[in-house]
Image (cartoon, grey):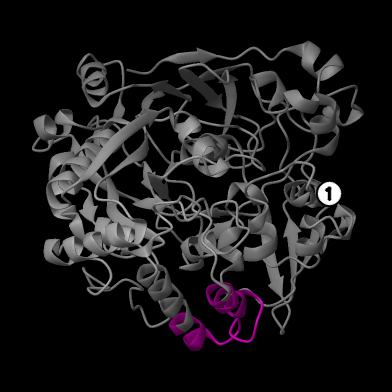
Amino acid sequence: MKKTIFFIFALALFLSGCGGKNTALKKGPLPEKSVNGAVLNVSIESIYDSLDPQTAVYATSFELIGNMMDGLMQMADDGSVKPAVAKEMKVSSDGLHYTFTLRDDVYWSNGVRVTADDFVYGWQRAIDPALESEYAFMISDIAQIKNATAIQAGQMEVNQLGVRAVDDFTFEVELQVPVSYFEQLLYFCTFYPANREFVEKCGDKYATSPETCLSNGAFLLTEYSEKGNTVSFIKNTAYYDASKVKLGGLHYELVKSGDEALQKYKAGQLDFVELSGSAVDKMKNDSDFKAVDSGFLYFITFNFDDTHFANKNLRKAVTFALDREQIVNEMADGSAAAYAAIPKGFAFSKSGQDFTANGIEFPNDCALDVDKAQAYWQAAKRELGVSSLEVELLTADNETQVIACNSIKRQLEDALDGLSVRIKTVEKKERRKIMSSGQFEFGLNNWGPDYADPMTYLAMWVTGNDNNMGNYFNPSYNALIASCTDGELCTKIQERWSALKRAEAMVMEDAVISPIYQKRNGDLIKPNVKGIAFHAVAINRIYKNTTK
């Protein structure tokens, strides 16, 4: 049934709030105050951390930001890259200079035109040490923007970043070295634009409410609070591509369990839900059920600064003691057992070869082998000088992750005599905070690919990377990754591919992590809902072409 939804702009926002007294408000169209169209009601199973594109970390936040903002490029429904705010891209013959010609019909939701200066400011803001963005490495280590590394280290000013606005609609980027996947990065949130005047007038309140968010994308934020359980959007009628957006709006609701999601789906309160736990088993044969690859790899992170897990034999014992097939069977959501640091089906060579082509990619480093696990366990006990050991496994309170950790605990205690595992369950934000601070022993961690290259995972274990939560330190590994990012191999595609495989082998041999499963989502989607674009990379769900 079609619904009409209404959105009343707060005029005070534009006159005296974050938008200030800006005469440019009159230069572009403002979104309409009321919109006809169906509202898609969606569940979210985990909390969001921020709606600031330069500081957001969680996949849920990426999706919410992607609803209301466009970057230079966007992801097409088939996963390819297509123009968004940029209508043309030119690359120099040496691969170091990119020139983007911007559309002249893209406006912020306060009527101010989106210009090249907004991209300059957004990218400078992301790398600015004062912002302390966990994704600053995307500008420096991954995109290799000129001077980014020095800026991140506090050795240069942000205005020396290799980006500039030639004029309002010409944006230039200079790289340190050629980056073969650079175009893919441009649909990721860190590379979105930001309006300096608006951001600076909002200050610390920026992107914390509908009044302190600006949109240049398909939808406008109408309801949001940092600790709330619902988020709502309305169609942005001033969006340059508004004619293709058929939904009148989006409404998200945070649900705590698969049973709650199922109950609300059956009651007609939600059109699209992600199931977990026993709810998956109940509905997996239903015609509305769809298993979708999320792209996320779940793995145990070992803390190398912990007295016990600094011991390689203990890490190996844990890795070989686990029956990953049993774990995913208990999860019952269609997830697949994982045996490598790079998940299957997301990174492919120029010839189409999957980077992780085999099931058990490293049989000598990651497989179910209880005899081998027990041998490593005995060696670990001798080296640690203990006959028994109690360890703490950290996990977020997500239902599926708790099921996995209960299985891990049971299997480790059954296989390794004298090992006792205590599970510590905390909220997702708290889990990340604890692991980032190094105050853990081992924990269930996860990562989803930001772009379709193995480096999106392998960069995590470089010394100094914010996501190297176990504090792994290996100069040889650092050097190998460096050679693939800004060194001699960065332009040698086949040699780089082989080197990345060697880097993955080092991660597995050192038991930096223990891969557990590659997540698939068990979704229920109402039959009248069509055109949701699912992606394993960057933004997992896009609704621009969705109908209801």
Q: Quadrant of residue 490?
A: bottom right
- Tell me residue 71's x, y (percent): 64, 49
Establish if 293 lies above or below 475.
Answer: above
In the foreground, 185 or 308: 308
287 inside magenta stretch: no
Q: Horizontal placement of 479 versus 30: left or right?
A: left
Quadrant occupied by the N terminus: top left
Note whether residue 246 is visible. no
Note whether residue 406 is visible. yes
Q: Quadrant of residue 488?
A: bottom right
Q: Which residue is mark 1?
A: 117
Q: Main secondary structure of the magenta part?
A: helix
In the foreground, 261 or 368: 368
Quadrant occupied by the C terminus: top left
Q: Horizontal placement of 276 versus 427: left or right?
A: left
Mark 1 belongs to which amino acid?
Answer: Asp
Establish if 486 lies above or below 508.
Answer: below
In the foreground, 397 or 541: 397
Residue displayed at 36% across by 36% down: 395
Which residues are drawn in magenta? Answer: 476-498
Residue displayed at 50% across by 42% down: 435
- Tell me residue 20's x, y (percent): 87, 22
Residue displayed at 10% across by 30% down: 282
